[in-house]
Image (tube, helix red, strand yellow):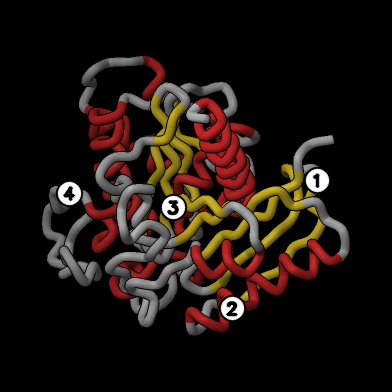
Amino acid sequence: MAPVYGAVEAGGTKFVCLVGSGPDDIRRTTRIPTGEPGPTLAAVVEFFRAALADGEPIRAIGLGSFGPLALRPDDPAYGRILRTPKPGWTGVDVVGPIRDGLGLPVALETDVNAAALAEGRWGAARDCRSFVYVTVGTGIGGGAVVDGRLVHGLGHPEMGHVPLPRLPGDTFAGTCQYHRDCWEGLACGPALAARFGRPPETLDGEALATAVALEAEYLALGLRALVYALAPERIVLGGGVAELSGLLDAVRSALGRTLGGYPGLAEHEAPAFVVRPGLGGRAGVLGALLVAEGATATVADAAGAAAEGG
């Protein structure tokens, strides 16, 4: 039987938790509103305690969280959320309370990295070794897989904060509290809401057409930067804003124009280059199962090293 893990997708509005081994084996799930850190994390622990008490053989917990995050194991701040716009969550340790409350290994990744893992294992990037998962919603974020491995460094990629050239005549100030008019500040859901005076999912008629045309151009500019920097085989475009009617085709068309014929790869013109997530809105929490799988591998590696050292 496949190993059973616990998964948590920690978002700004809700924490989604599940127990299972993959898309076809989800044994239980719940949604917890994101409130104050202490009570929210305590509710997560109680969900998994109940599952363990019912005999679920959970081996580890994977956590895909909003960020930014301290992800390097040698960082004294490991497991904490760094300077986040989410009120009350800056500096919060999201790993410790879950690990200590359950006595299980806990591994942490960004929510978009977790989603990228899931799309690579079960979703729209199953046949790719190098791809990017981009989500456009409350913010813009991305996870990159290069030659089968997530990209990490001093921190984790913050794709939504790359600067973009402005479209001619666009005087919108931008909504990013750090950079104002970065990619996220110009094209995330709240930016569209500020531009049009209502949430993007409520737009229709001429307002929707205008919003889709504008959004497609800015998304294409951001994706162009990823194409040139990372050379992905595929881009998976998710998030609530990406569901706007007509947007996916508009992005494909705009990306072709903004690439300007360089480097001239036929794959960039194909519909299979920019696609919707194969797992829909479940990509993040399913990816957290794969993050948990990595936690058990890390524990096994540490145990093996200790045994070799005598």
Lower position in the chain sequence, tag 1 or tag 2: 1
Residue 204 percent coordinates (x, y): 48, 67
Lower position in the chain sequence, tag 2 or tag 4: 2
Lower position in the chain sequence, tag 1 or tag 4: 1
Please, what secondary structure does the residue beneath circle 1 have? strand
Q: CA distance from mark 2 to mark 4?
A: 34 Å
Q: Are marks 2 and 4 in contact (CB under 8 Å)?
A: no
Residue most extreme to the right: 54
Q: Which residue is mark 4?
A: 164
Q: Which image quadrant: the N terminus?
A: top right
User: Which is nearer the eye, 130 or 135?
Assistant: 130
Q: Which residue is mark 3?
A: 110
Q: CA distance from mark 1 to mark 3?
A: 23 Å
* Foreground: disc 3 or disc 4: 3
Q: Amino acid at mark 2?
A: Pro
Residue 33, numbered circle = 2
Tell me the crowding category of disc 4: few under 14, some 14 to 19, or many 20 or more residues within 10 angstroms, Cα based: some
Tell me the crowding category of disc 1: few under 14, some 14 to 19, or many 20 or more residues within 10 angstroms, Cα based: few
Lower position in the chain sequence, tag 3 or tag 2: 2
Please, what secondary structure does the residue beneath circle 3 have? strand
Lower position in the chain sequence, tag 3 or tag 4: 3
User: Which is nearer the eye, 221 or 156?
Assistant: 156
In the rendered image, is residue 210 in sight?
Answer: no
Please, what secondary structure does the residue beneath circle 4 have? loop
Tell me which residue sits at (24%, 17%) in the image.
Answer: 263
Q: Amino acid at mark 4?
A: Leu
Tell me which residue sits at (44%, 29%) in the image.
Answer: 149
